[in-house]
Amino acid sequence: MDVTARGAQADDLPIVVALAEAAISEMAPVRGGSIWSRYEARPEPLDPTFEMQLGDDTSLVAVGSIDETIVGYAGGRLVELHDGSTMTALSDIYVLPGARGVGVGECLMDWIVDWSRAAGSIGIDSIALPGDRNTKNFFESFGLVARAITVHRSLG
């Protein structure tokens, strides 16, 4: 089994959009997912957001594959900090449930770390929803640890 990650290309967009839809659908019903899906997740329609990122040097879209079949994706962008440095804001990382546990996510993260270093990023930020131990543990295995906790009170 050959597990790889690479930068996405225009031909990959239909599968990337389908994966993003699956990610949002999977995360929306879990704790914190209702607000996440309306605030931090990519807005509909998804296609233009990915198209815009593909043509932007400060954005990343990557795909993860098993034997050349795309089963995961990641997306993010460089953000400028107040001191003029840049950081990678990783907005998306997702692997199909049946393809988890074989290294696709790890390949994607290695690609993201390399891309971020090459871009001069001082670090990588992402989100793990409360109670999602698998995502938290995955991120921690790459050195991403909590630096802030977002709190929320529902008024509805």
Image (tube, grey):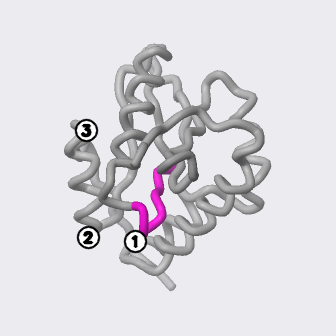
Residue 104 to residue 57: above or below: below
User: Where residue 153 appears, x then y in whole percent?
Assistant: 38, 73
Whether pointer 1 and pointer 2 mark residues with C-beta atoms closer than 8 Å, the reply is: yes
Percent from the top left, x then y, of residue 108?
Answer: 43, 40
Residue drawn at (46%, 80%) of the image: 29
Q: Outermost residue toward the bottom?
A: 156
Mark 3 neighbour density, 10 Å: few (under 14) some (14–19) many (20 or more): few
Question: Circle 3 sits on which residue?
Answer: 142
Residue at x-position 45% and y-position 39%: 4
**Is label 1 or label 2 in front?**
2
Earlier in the chain: of badge 3 and badge 2, it is 2
Queried whether the magenta region covers residue 95, the answer comes back as yes
Which residue is labeled 1 in the image? Answer: 32
Would you name the residue on which mark 2 appears? 131
Foreground mark, 3 or 2?
3
Residue 77: x and y, percent? 56, 33
The amino acid pointed to by label 3 is Phe
